[in-house]
Each structure stands twice: as C-alpha cells, then as structure tokens.
Image (cartoon, helix red, strand yellow):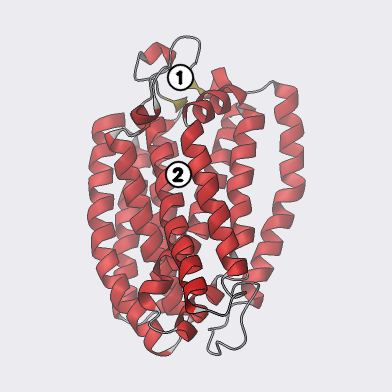
C-alpha cells in the first residue's frame, strides 16, 4: 500500500468517525424539542451532548484538513464546486454551536424557543448537506480535463447525492434517539425508545434504497457489499435492541450502521476520489490527486504521534460522562 492509499484510508476513517460521533449529536439536537415535552426535559436532552458536541466536531475539521494536505487537487476541485454549500454548512454549524451557549442565557420562553429552533435546523441541515456532498463524489460532478468544476450550484443536487443526504440524516436521527434512550430516564427515555422504532423502520428502508442505488451507480466490490449488508443489519439490530430495552446494544448497533454506510461510500469510490460526470477520463484519482511523498511522510509521523492522544482524550471524556442524566438543575458541560 502506497502512502497515498494509506491517506485515503485515513481520510475515510476521519469522515466515518465524524458521522459516528457527531451523528448522535445531530440526532439529539434535531429531536430535543420533539421528545422534550417540558423545558426541563429539553434541557436534559441538550445536556446529554453538552460534554461531547464540540469535541466531536473536531473530526470534521481534521477530515477536511487531511484532504487539504494529502490530496490538494481533490480539495481544490471538491470544495470549489461546493463553495455555496460549504458556506451553508458553516452557517448551520455556527448557529448550532451558538444555540448551545446562548439558549440558557435568556429568561424568556421566546428566547429559548428561538435558540431551540436554531439548534433543530442546524442539526438537520448539517448532516444533510454533508451527505449530499459525499454522495456527489460517487454520483459524479461536471469536471473538465483541467480538474475544474464547470457546473452550477444546482448541479450539486444529484439524485444519489440527495438520497445519501436523506439517508445519513435518518441514521443521525436514529443514532440520536438511541443515545437519548441510553443517557436519560423516565418519560423522556421511553419516548426516545418509541421514536427510535419508527426511525429505525424509516432508516432501514432508506439504507436499502441507498444500497441498491450504489450498486447501480458504482459497481462496488465485495467489501462494499459486506459494508452495505452490515449497515442493514446494524439498523435492524438497533431496533431489536430498543424493543428489548437493551439501550447500550441499540446505540452500538446504530453506530455500526452509520459507520458501515459512510464507509461503503469511500470503499466504492476507491481508487477515485471524485467522479467526473463529464468524462471518466476527467475523474480525480487517489494517485493523481495526492501530495508528494515527503509531505505524506511528515503527515504520517504527525498522525501516528497525535491521533492516539486524541483518541485517549475522547475516550476518557466519554467514560467520565457516561452516566444517565436525571437532574435538570445540574447541567452537564456548557449546554444550556
């Protein structure tokens, strides 16, 4: 395996890790007003992700930075094509982040309702936009022989890309519901379990269509078929776990479903990094988009040193804040 191939795997791991970790954050943010019937319950829902959300978003930053450093041609073409979408994504993430900090600062119901709406919209919009962008890599964008995007903003809405966005959104909602079932108690947890069953059925159908569409689009290999099967099994296992009141198993299964779905995209994409819908000859490949060997060697050393430290820190954080939240008067983290 060349260093370019290795860094494609690393990029795939970063993006997969982001959706697994931030996925339940997005899900809780989108569902907190749906499942929380009172202000106290909404605070409990938000506080379940209070210690985690900002750390989880680091994976997105690192995933984008890894593409920038390891595959500059891929970064230039993809991000310039999705410029307006990236701006929309940043606005969603910024407003979502502000809602965590500012929602509890005001005293009026209108203030809290406004920031709850921002949290909900941002948590729905962000995974949808990212899902569309990832799906477009495989579906194809109009790219010419100079690796320049020749389409418009509306060309980003490919059929497969839009469906990928909807699929990842449903998986985030399922992931968030299982997380709330795991981290809360009482009526809020019970409502999360009931909604998780409904979301599980919808996610199972979405992943099934996603798998069939991917097979028709990309002619994936054996590894992709295995991952797609694992994604379907993960969703089914999450629903079964919820029905059996096995919240930990349900949350783990939804994480597996998310990881397998995102992972299947990258496995099916390889050895390309961005398909050109204009001509197959214009598609960007791993080898053709990679940085030089020296840059990749330096990046590899840095990753070997710092990635384990990040994993240890995040693992410790999840261990410390692993208990269910019962008292809304003692918020966890900075969420309000």
Pick whichever, 56 or 156, lies toward us.
156
Query: Pointer 1: residues within 10 angstroms few (<14), some, or many (20+)?
Result: many
Q: Residue at x 24, y 38 (%)?
A: 213
Which quadrant does the C terminus fall into?
Answer: bottom right
Q: Secondary structure at mark 1?
A: loop
The label shown at residue 175 is none
- Viewer-proximal residue, 113 or 168? 113
The local secondary structure at tag 2 comes to helix
Camera-side residue of 106 and 200: 106
Q: Percent x, y for residue 280?
A: 37, 15
Residue appearing at x 48%, y 78% in the figure: 109
The percent position of residue 111, horizontal first and vertical second, equals: 52, 72
Q: CA distance from mark 2 to mark 1?
A: 18 Å
As drawn, the label of residue 149 is 1
Q: Position of residue 27 (x, y in %)?
A: 43, 64
Q: Quadrant of residue 200?
A: bottom left
Q: Which residue is mark 2?
A: 130
Residue 210 falls left or right of residue 65:
left
Tag 2 and tag 1, C-beta contact below 8 Å: no
Residue 64 drawn at (x, y percent): 59, 39
**Looking at the image, residue 322 lies above or below residue 139:** below
């Amino acid at each position: 395996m060349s260093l370019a191939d290795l860094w494609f795997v690393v990029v795939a791991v970063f993006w997969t890790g982001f959706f697994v970790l931030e996925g339940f954050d997005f899900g809780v943010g989108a569902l907190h007003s749906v499942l929380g019937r009172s202000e106290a319950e909404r605070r409990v829902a938000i506080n379940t992700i209070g210690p985690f959300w900002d750390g989880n978003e680091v994976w997105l930053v690192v995933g984008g930075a890894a593409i920038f450093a390891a595959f500059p041609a891929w970064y230039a073409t993809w991000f310039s094509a999705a410029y307006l979408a990236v701006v929309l994504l940043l606005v969603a993430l910024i407003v979502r982040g502000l809602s965590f900090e500012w929602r509890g600062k005001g005293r009026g119901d209108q203030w809290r309702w406004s920031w709850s709406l921002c949290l909900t919209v941002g948590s729905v919009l962000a995974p949808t936009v990212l899902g569309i962008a990832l799906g477009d890599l495989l579906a194809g964008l109009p790219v010419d022989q100079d690796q320049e995007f020749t389409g418009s903003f509306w060309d980003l809405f490919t059929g497969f890309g839009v469906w990928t966005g909807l699929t990842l959104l449903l998986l985030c909602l399922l992931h968030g519901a299982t997380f709330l079932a795991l981290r809360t108690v009482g009526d809020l947890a019970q409502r999360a379990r009931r909604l998780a069953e409904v979301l599980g059925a919808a996610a199972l159908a979405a992943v099934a269509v996603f798998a069939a569409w991917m097979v028709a689009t990309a002619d994936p290999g054996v590894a992709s078929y295995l991952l797609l099967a694992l994604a379907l099994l993960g969703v089914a296992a999450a629903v079964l776990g919820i029905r059996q009141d096995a919240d930990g198993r349900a949350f783990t299964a939804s994480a597996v479903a998310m990881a397998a779905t995102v992972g299947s995209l990258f496995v099916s994409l390889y050895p390309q990094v961005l398909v050109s819908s204009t001509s197959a000859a214009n598609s960007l490949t791993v080898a053709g988009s990679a940085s030089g060997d020296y840059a990749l060697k330096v990046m590899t050393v840095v990753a070997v040193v710092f990635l384990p430290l990040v994993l240890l820190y995040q693992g410790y954080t999840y261990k410390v804040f692993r208990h269910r939240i019962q008292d809304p008067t003692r918020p966890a983290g900075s969420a309000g």
